Amino acid sequence: MAPPEELTHWVGLEWAIITRMATTDFNLTPILDALVERGWCVAPDFLLVEAVAELRTECLARHEAGAFHHAGVGSGSAQVINEVRGDAIQWIEADDPAPALRAYLDATEALRQAVNRELYLGLEQLEAHFAVYPHGAFYKKHLDRFRDDDRRSLTAIVYLNPDWSAEDGGLLRFWPDPTGEGEALEIVPTGGTLVTFLADRFWHEVTAARRERLAVTGWFKRR
Ligand code: OGA
Ligand code: MN
């Protein structure tokens, strides 16, 4: 399968983009297969266009209402705000009743259950936040697992940006090789696309965004 140009810059690595199979019930099998085989996966249209639009509106409304704070790195007292990342975030409660969150929470819950069934990861709970990268913001190369908290097992990012192109920056650079060396994939943060990977294994970064860039970023945690 030829890599669709709008989704990523193809840099010669094995292709792991999953094609959507159904319009309503997302077929999770290709995602599970990719996670088993290589520990990461990019799935376009994980959320339908309407669900993405609602989530985006909700995210922007909360952002404009001043409900976001500047993201730090680390946790608790080790948290620092520095030149590592420039996004603003708002945490989402698992029981948040906002209708705009329904599709996202349902889809991630289905993913959690499927992953537990097939990969025995024992994922218990989703910790998720909206993220807004203003123009110029980036997130330097990192792993997602905190030194003082190793419960984050699986990362799941869903993008909320309609009509994003590579020229808009804000690309997710992702190193499929766990050493963090070699070639990186550059994934375009197109609305509805899910990127999921084992949180402790893969180095990644967000390149400087040239437009406001929105995402819901979640981590499935084990006990
Ligand atoms: C993160 C992160 C990547 C992205 O929030 O830890 O790496 O594409 N986000 O938003
Ligand atoms: Mn990350």
Image (cartoon, rainbow, N blue to C red):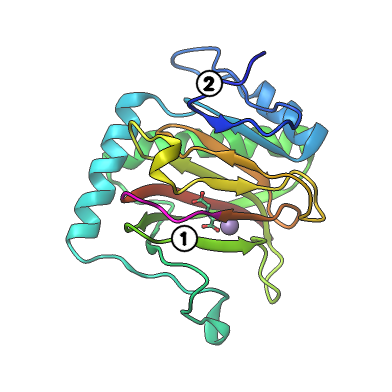
How many marks the image carries: the answer is 2
Q: Is residue 153 above or below residue 107?
A: below
Please tell me whether mark 1 or mark 2 is closer to you in this view: 1
Task: Count residues near mark 2 (Cα–Cα under 10 Å), then give few for <14, some for 14-19, many for 20+.
Answer: some
Q: Are marks 1 and 2 in contact (CB under 8 Å)?
A: no
Which amino acid is tagged 2?
Answer: Phe
The stretch in magenta equals: 206-211
Which amino acid is tagged 1?
Answer: Phe
* Residue drawn at point x = 72 percent, y = 52 percent: 202
Q: Nearer the viewer, residue 209 or 112?
A: 209
Q: Quadrant of ligand 2?
A: bottom right
**Picture coordinates of residue 89, whole percent (x, y):** 38, 62
* Residue drawn at point x = 30 percent, y = 65 percent: 68
Q: Nearer the viewer, residue 106 or 204?
A: 204
Q: Is residue 98 above or below residue 70?
A: above
Does the magenta segment cover residue 176? Answer: no
Task: Count residues near mark 1 (Cα–Cα under 10 Å), then give few for <14, some for 14-19, many for 20+.
Answer: many
**Picture coordinates of residue 200, whole percent (x, y):** 73, 58
Q: Which residue is mark 2?
A: 26
Q: Residue furthest bottom?
A: 77
User: Which element is circle 1 on?
Assistant: loop
